[in-house]
Amino acid sequence: MKKTLILIISVLFAISLNAQNEQHLYLHHSGAVIYNDAVHNIDGITFQGNPASAVVDATSGQTSFPITMIDSITFGIEEAPSGDFVRIVYNGNSVEITNPFSNEGVSVSNNQADVVVSSSKANVIYSLSGTTSNGSITFMSSKDFSLILDNANLSSASKAVIDIASETNATIELNGTSTLSDGSNGAQKAAICSAGDLTFAKADGTLNINGNTKHGIFAEGDLIVSGGKIIINDAQSDALHIDFFTQTNGEISILHSGSDGIDSSTDINIFGGSISINSTSDDTKGLNASETISISGGMVEITSSGYDSKAIKCDDLVSISGGSIEINHSGDISKGIKSAYLNVSGGEITITASGKTVVEQEENQEVPSYCSAIKIDTEINITGGNFNINLPSSNDGGKAISCDGNAIINGGTFELETHGDGASYIVSGNTKDAYTSSCIKCDGNLEIIAGSFNCTSTGKGGKGINADGNMTIGHADAPDRDLIISISTSGERVTITSGGGGPWGGGDYANPKALKCDGDMTINSGAIIINCTQNNEGGECIESKAQMTINGGNIEAYSKSDDVINATRNLTINGGTIYCHSDNNDAIDSNGTLFINGGLTIANGARQPECGFDCDNNQFKITGGIVCGTGGDTSNPTANVCTQPSLKINTQAGYAIQVLNASGEIVVTYQCPTMQGGGGGGGWPPGGGSGIKFLLTHPDFAIGQTYTVKYNGTISGGDNWNGYYTGNVTYSGGQQTTVTLNSMVTTVNAGGGGW
């Protein structure tokens, strides 16, 4: 903080000190000037946000730069050009040249409409105007210079129209509307070629470029755009092919290119202005950089329809801290953003990915390749930004956000939708598999700490948030409002191999899941709402193929046809408020052990043989917390490991239950749910009837104490959370019985029975 304040004071002092000398302010990155304006035009520089950005407030508007992009800030006097312009006016096959510096080291010669400039004088301004169908200009200057395109309409049959052959800094200003077109028969690399750095300065003009041989603009150095409107009507290869690209203002519109839109051998930095790219060619990129793509302001719009195309492609890091990005890509197996690493701290990101999945042959096996909105190879780190991603029904297996490695999300707003059906395919021989869509898919470990997530998946086998490794949701002791997760799935399962039928089912399926990981899942905090409405089994709401630990959070989850919470090895609940309801299966199901140590858990399962709590007769340990579990059956707590007693109440679906202690104080008031359907899983006998098992435990329960159980009455008043009542509750009517807790698990009949 101290260093930041010193930098602010130093910069503002320098601006104040140098304003009287009419000096210019320069911001530098990797040897390039990324901002240049006269000091008297600048009101100040402020440092904002985390991560910090430098905001330059000038008469032309505000421009924001991430601090990490600024290597240095310098001041210097820009030499005004002496004398007049060098004026070059094209008229068909001839030119008219006015050179006031012929005795000052500036030589301008021509062969018909081909012009050659040799200069040793600094800061000369050259003005090009007029029209030619076979003309060009070549600059061989040892000093920096400026070029004004003043309504120039220039074409060359076999050369670059503008060729800056020396490694100097050239600045182009646009006046009016100019058009540059190179021929299709030459050996030139572009309509505009530069051996050094090239800058399009602040201006209101328009430049149309037709790259008929290869590129629209080629620069061996940096290309900086700070003004004007550049339109690449057509390019046979990359529209812009440069070493380093920076845009702070102005407009770039690429209507067609045979290859990439903007291709940089190092970095692409976008601080402001707008970029619009339309690409129809296969295997092309809108923005393509070998090292880093950084977007902190402005607007980027990319439309691509080519097979295996990438709207934004970087071999290393894509960093987004601001601005607006809109991508619409429809090519099969195309990608919206593709890179090794992704860091997002701000900005608006809108992507529609409508291409199809293609199953390709790799090493004698069939492997599916997807059309995904965001595809990252190594690591994702998101702390902010607004994501609006849609995968329509034509996208049958893509992912809204996909990472091959680990991902950490600690902020941001996410509106993610997938609508395409998954499908099965033959891997090789008789081996089959299936591909499905996901809103978020992580092959490694996934941490979702904070943010707002609204995930919808309607296609067959579609998943909400899915990780192959471990998954962590929320942060210990964080308020639930910091993390909002809403997930809905409605697609049916994808059949890989069909089963033999019968009450135990069979077959192999790619199932829809809302929140699922193959490794350990830990839920620490957050408001989590999940709805799985598919008609067939397989649509669990929250599933871990290993161990699941719930330490906190507010979870409300509904499954129409399968388990709500499922863990393969162990489920431990240490805290949080949890509501689970399944119409046709278990509410909470652990295929291994089940431990409850705290929190409030309401688990409503379906009719027998389904359960509120099911742990397959493995250890069921209760040491604390409040539990209200209803279903046709329940797993019994393991008495010799429990430290908090439980009450198993045989009652009826839809009954209101109230339990009071010996002093007449209310311990629990609960409205049992009605049953929506029969049992959904295997087992015997089949579901039916209205009798249920109500498993109840509470920290006020004590061995040896007697309790009154009221049932079949009516509840009024109080605060109701999914059937669990607190506050000023009134219970009227019905019947009652008493029970003494003589062991860790005590059974009592309250209007129900058993079978």
Image: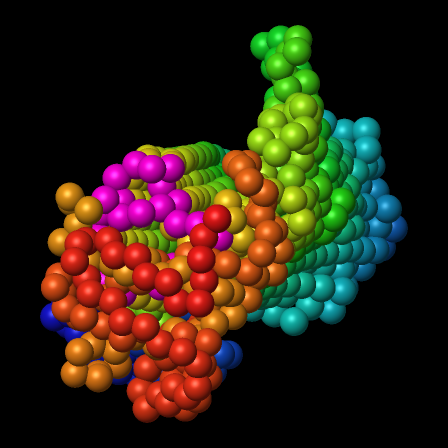
Q: Is residue 131 visible?
A: yes
* Vertical relation: 700 (above or below) 409: below
In the image, is 622 to the left or to the right of 56?
left
Residue 74 within the magenta-colored segment of the rendering: no
Looking at the image, which residue is at 62% across and 14% down?
431
State the residue in front, 194 or 431: 431
Asked if residue 633 is among those painted magenta in the image, a careful observer would answer yes
Q: Is residue 159 visible?
A: no
Residue 405 in the image: x percent, y percent? 40, 35
Residue at the image point whose x is 48% and y is 48% from the top: 755
Image quadrant assignment for residue 550: bottom left
Answer with the quarter of the image where residue 183 lies: top right
Highlighted magenta segment, given as a residue range: 614-638
Q: Nearer the viewer, residue 71 or 470?
A: 470
In this rendered view, identify the residue nearer to me: 334 or 532.
Answer: 532
Q: How is the image coloured?
A: rainbow
- Counting from the top left corner in percent of width and height, residue 535 is at 67, 49
Up/down of 609 relative to 17, above or below: above
